[in-house]
Every structure is written in structure tokens, then in C-alpha cells.
Amino acid sequence: MVNRRPRLARRTQHHRQPVLRRISTAPAPSTSLQGNGESSVLSLYVLNAAGLTKQHAVEHLASDLNGVDAAVVSETHFGAKHADNIVSVPDYTLFRRDRSICNDRGRRMKGGGVAIYVRSALHSAIWKYSGDDPKFEVLWVRSGDFFIGAVYNPPKPPYHLQSLISYIDGCVQELLRDFSTAQIVIAGDFNQLPETDLVAATGLTPIVRQPTRGGNVLDQIYVYDPFAYDVVRVVKSIVKSDHNAVVAYTQHGRVSPVNSSTVA
């Protein structure tokens, strides 16, 4: 695999710089993933929430998590008016990237946005790609050697799909160059992003096989080690959404997460 920086597509939209926020809802973490006898593979919860700004949506999300290590949420619909303390989950550190794409009048386009909630007992921080581009709804969080990328590719993106694939590949290549032991996971709602092209570019493997919305697998998890997770389930979330959630974990991990009913 060649370590290279991709050529990004020329911007054709007005943008604001993306809002990257971190908020902890618990005391400073006192443990780390490595060296404490715990699994180095984080248990994951993935959901297109169709808006965490809906009444009681955050409370429903908190009930869903049930101790899962990290939650990747797309279509948060967060904006400047949504204060961190309103959308936080107890015992989790929140990282968010609100949609920053603007229309021709310079107004931020509504909807979109991604967030990652990580258990506050785990050391975690934002990792920022050197070629960061605000038109892509992509957020990276690091916990030890574990890097989680949250992605939302909207149904009608303001960019060519191949430019997003090149952007994700650039992120992966930079991580592999700078962190030789990096464990990389990318999750979120990819909509119609060509799976075979993303796999060919990054070398990652999709592990979600059951439909997450209607008859389609829109919400996906890509990993380097396809055997890292021996349990991958599609479940009905308590959060009101037209998407089902995905949970992935290893039976040797800390928890069998999520207060939800199994769909497949």
C-alpha cells in the first residue's frame, strides 16, 4: 500500500470551518485501553439518528448505550444553538463535527453532522487529518492505538463520491504512516458510496451484512481485521429513526452492549 496524500477535489461550495468539540460528562479518565487487562478492541454502537435534537432523543441514546465503549452517530443535526451540555450523555465524552457546508447565500445547510461518544473512563481525543476539508462530514477520535472515524455521506452530497473515497484513503494512509500500531475503524452512514471502491482504496473490510434501513445496508463498519469483532448485530434503537442501529463487539470484551431488540 503506497503512502501518499490524495489530490482532493476542487471546492465548489461555500464553507465554514467545521466545529470540532470535546466535552466530558464524567471526571477525568483514570484508565487506558492498554496495559490494564482489558480488550484493545472497543465495543461499538453505530446509528443514523435522524436528529439527536428531537425531544428525548439524547436520553433514548443514553439508554441504548448500556456501557458500550464508543458510539458513532450520524445525522446529529447539531448546530451552534445546541449547547454541549444539552446533548451530552452521562459517563461519556462527546466529540462532534457539525455540518459546516453553506448554501449560495452563505447560510449553513441544515441537518447532517456526526458525533462520537466515548466512555469517559477511556483516554480519548480528536485526531485531525493534515488535509482536513470542511465539506466532508468526517470526524476522527483516538483512544490508545484505536482510531475511530465517523462518516456521514448524505444522499445528495455536494461533492463527487470518489473525492470522499480519496479523502478517507488519505486519512487512513496518514494514520498508518504516523502510527505503526494503529487499529482503524470507520463507521457511519455511507448511503450510496461505492463499497468496492472504498475497500480497494483503503484495504478495509465491511462487517455489517444485514440491512440497516429498508432492504439496504447504509450504515456500515469498516475494519482492517475482519476477525476483530466476533459479534455484529443489527438492532432496533430506542431512538426514533428510520435506521436500525449496529452493535459490534468481541465476546472477550467488557460488555455485551445495547438495550435494544435484535433485528437480525
Image (cartoon, rainbow, N blue to C red):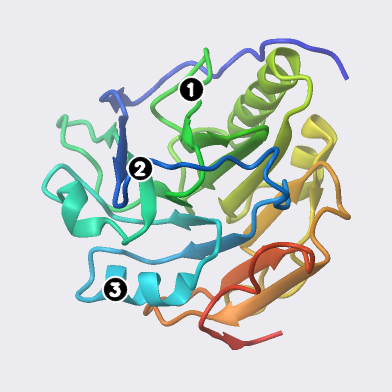
Which is nearer the eye, 84 or 246?
84
Whichever of callouts 3 and 1 sits on the residue coming sooner in the sequence is 3
Residue type pointed to by label 2: Arg
Image spot of residue 251 (x, y percent): 78, 69
Whichever of callouts 3 and 2 sits on the residue coming sooner in the sequence is 3
Residue at point 59% right, 73% down?
257
Q: CA distance from mark 3 to mark 2?
A: 17 Å
The picture quadrant where one finds residue 57 is bottom left
Q: Which residue is mark 3?
A: 59
Q: CA distance from mark 3 to mark 1?
A: 29 Å
Residue type pointed to by label 3: Glu
Which is nearer the eye, 253 or 88?
253
Vertical comparison of 164 with 209: above or below: above
Q: Which residue is mark 2?
A: 96
Image spot of residue 34 (x, y percent): 68, 38
- What secondary structure is marked by label 2? strand
Please indicate, yes or no, whether residue 113 appears anywhere in the rendered image: no
Q: CA distance from mark 1 to mark 2?
A: 13 Å
Whichever of callouts 1 and 2 sits on the residue coming sooner in the sequence is 2
In contact (CB < 8 Å): disc 3 and disc 1: no
Residue type pointed to by label 1: Lys
Q: Which residue is mark 1?
A: 128
Residue at point 32% right, 46% down?
27
Q: Residues within 10 Å of mark 1 (few under 14, many from 20)?
A: some
* Left or right side of 11 for 106: left
